[in-house]
Image (spheres, grey):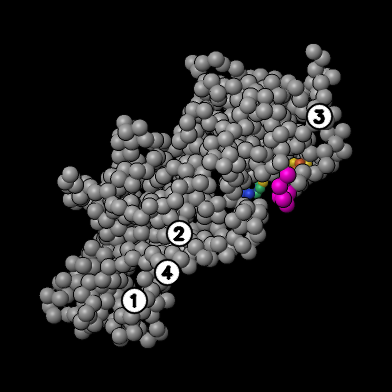
Amino acid sequence: MMDEVVFIDGNEAVGWGALAADCDAFFGYPITPQNNITEWFAKEYPKRGRAFVQTSSETASINWLYGGASVGKRVITSTSSPGWALMQETLSHMANTEVPCVIVLVQRGGPGQGTTRHAQMDYTSATKGGGNGGYKNIVLGPYSAQEAHDLVQVAFYLADKYINPVIVLSDGIIGTTLETVTLKKLEFEKLPEKDWALRGKGRQKDKKRRVLTSAQGLVPTPRNPSFVALQNTLFEKHSTMEREEIRYETYQLEDADLVLVAYGYSARVSMEAMSQARGIGLKVGMIRPVTLWPFPYQQVKEQAKKGNKILVVEDSLGQMLMDVKMACDDGTEIGLVSCLDRHEVMEGGAIYPEKVLDKIRAMME
Amino acid sequence: MNDNKELVAGTPKIKINVPVPLAFCQGCQHGSATRVIWDSLEDLGLEDRIIWVGGVTCGTVSAFISDVDAIGPVPHGRAPDIASAMRRLSDKETIIITYQGDGDAIAIGTESLIQAAARAERITVFMVNNVNYGTTGGQMAPTTLIGQKTTTSPTGRGTNKEGFPINAAELVAVLGGTAYSARGSLTSPANYNKTKKYVKKALQKQIDDIGFSFVEILSACPANWGMPPVECLKWIDNTLTKQYPLGEFKDLDALV
Ligand SMILES: Cc1ncc(C[n+]2csc(CCOP(=O)(O)OP(=O)(O)O)c2C)c(N)n1
Ligand code: SF4
């Protein structure tokens, strides 16, 4: 059967991706600019016998995920920046308990109530463990509607593989831009059954009870009999993810003298700037991290080592910039195109390719 | 049958010993509150198909010493959200209960509790009310009596600044999704047996798919009340029940 090609935005693409991943339930609370994700699930899920619930807050949403994950189901929520802030406590609980879920964060301007439009200002809280206790979660950054659809499926796979939450870090432009998307079920390695899930003792294969707790480290579990055992488990888990799961795309690095580093909508803008720069003979390449955590430090480091200049493009005051700096030596020349370079000062402003090209020229000429 | 003579004795099969570094203080009634739920689960034969959601309270320990599938402590106050998701994603035969404190259920967890009741979630919430925050050392709770001294109301709770106690069982009863709401105590075998009837009825509402069910259980906290256990029981009978009367506040066979 041919895969269906549709014309949808990056928000709806999340819904189709979740369905392709056989996600059982969506629990969410309205917030701009991701409302049509919630509405997509309201329309498409119940008629397919899957669960949709509009929750009473984002604090509730993430706890619904915690409950759904604990009974072994694939669960997803989506939100924007203020709602993301409300989810941090339970996200941390889920990391301790070791249960999977997928959270789609369609970033908007901040801080505070901020704007209702695009921005990229939650990179740090998403990639560095926004809640308490120093946990880590994989963060995937789609740069198109197609990739939103695909990465949601990857997110479910990785969440189940590591039994840990996974974040899909989108933004208001990726979320609301209409593009052609091929609806396609991605294939993944088969994962073990969720033997740890709660279903009632009598329904467990061995008829023995299962206990899940977010107080691993205090309450001894077979997997983590002590506090340090838990820290070891998490350390191993984080290290394995850092070793195995780094994903990125590179563009025209072979002869590049300046390398752009960008994700999400900024990556789309940067690609346009790159081709304009090439058009006037400037050797510009690009690294697009697809996993924002674990971050492709090595790939950025190699470019810095070659003596190439680095230009970070992100619609914030410079958050991914910190990861790029960590990857580079002190001597590397690193530039930034930030939210201060938006084409217009009100909330509708965005980073345009022209601004990126200006910065490229300033650094290269 | 004379209720007063029926003693609570023996050890329920559900109770198991695990190496949990937590215990109740002497005379704490979380043990009895857990016991009344255990007895009811055994009577109804639900051990094999129940999921126990333990809130953040001294009573979280019950989740670990009960031989049933369990999760806890879940984020403070959010047990009804978690239980609701389990309800929506489990088969009808699965029974979902929460075990919460009064601070957990009606301070930080107010949204979670009220919304679950309004949605008529087929879950059963047990709120063990000791009119203070036991776990953290006896601070004021929304249930603390007017005039009652706690570590954060050292001169006694005043209505002007600290406000009025919340009667959770009556409040929950008002909501359209609630099929059953009751308040019991455990100060005598008679009261124990009455409370057990409430607990079983609440579980039956879930089994029969009628609506949300709720039982508030008044519970002694000798450590923080600063009274010997027997005095605590008298205080519950003579003082606490004036603010928190025992009985059933709602009992429906179908939601209207
Ligand atoms: C988000 C959060 N805030 C505060 C706490 C600290 N805390 C633990 S138990 C508790 C109060 C519990 O009181 P109650 O629900 O009445 O139960 P009790 O201990 O009296 O049985 C508090 C405030 C916490 N664990 N999490
Ligand atoms: S502090 Fe109070 S509620 Fe907690 S165990 Fe001690 S007596 Fe029980």
Q: Are marks 2 and 1 on the same chain?
A: yes
Q: Give the chain of mark 1.
A: A
> What amino acid is at disc 2?
Asn
Q: CA distance from mark 2 to mark 1?
A: 21 Å
Q: Are marks 4 and 2 on the same chain?
A: yes
Write the residue at 46% across / 66% down. Answer: A240
Q: Are marks 1 and 3 on the same chain?
A: no
Write the residue at 26% across / 71% down. Answer: A250
Does residue A151 show up? yes
> What amino acid is at disc 3?
Ala
Q: Is disc 3 placed on a helix, strand or loop?
A: loop
> What amino acid is at disc 4?
Arg
Q: Residues within 10 Å of mark 4 (few under 14, many from 20)?
A: few
A322 or A16: nearer the viewer: A16
> What amino acid is at disc 1?
Val
From the image, tell me which residue sits under label 2: A137
Q: Which mark is residue A243?
A: 4
B232 or B63: nearer the viewer: B63
Q: Residues within 10 Å of mark 3 (few under 14, many from 20)?
A: few
Q: CA distance from mark 3 to mark 2?
A: 49 Å
Q: Which mark is residue A335?
A: none
Queried whether the magenta region covers residue A341, the answer comes back as no
Q: Is disc 1 placed on a helix, strand or loop?
A: helix
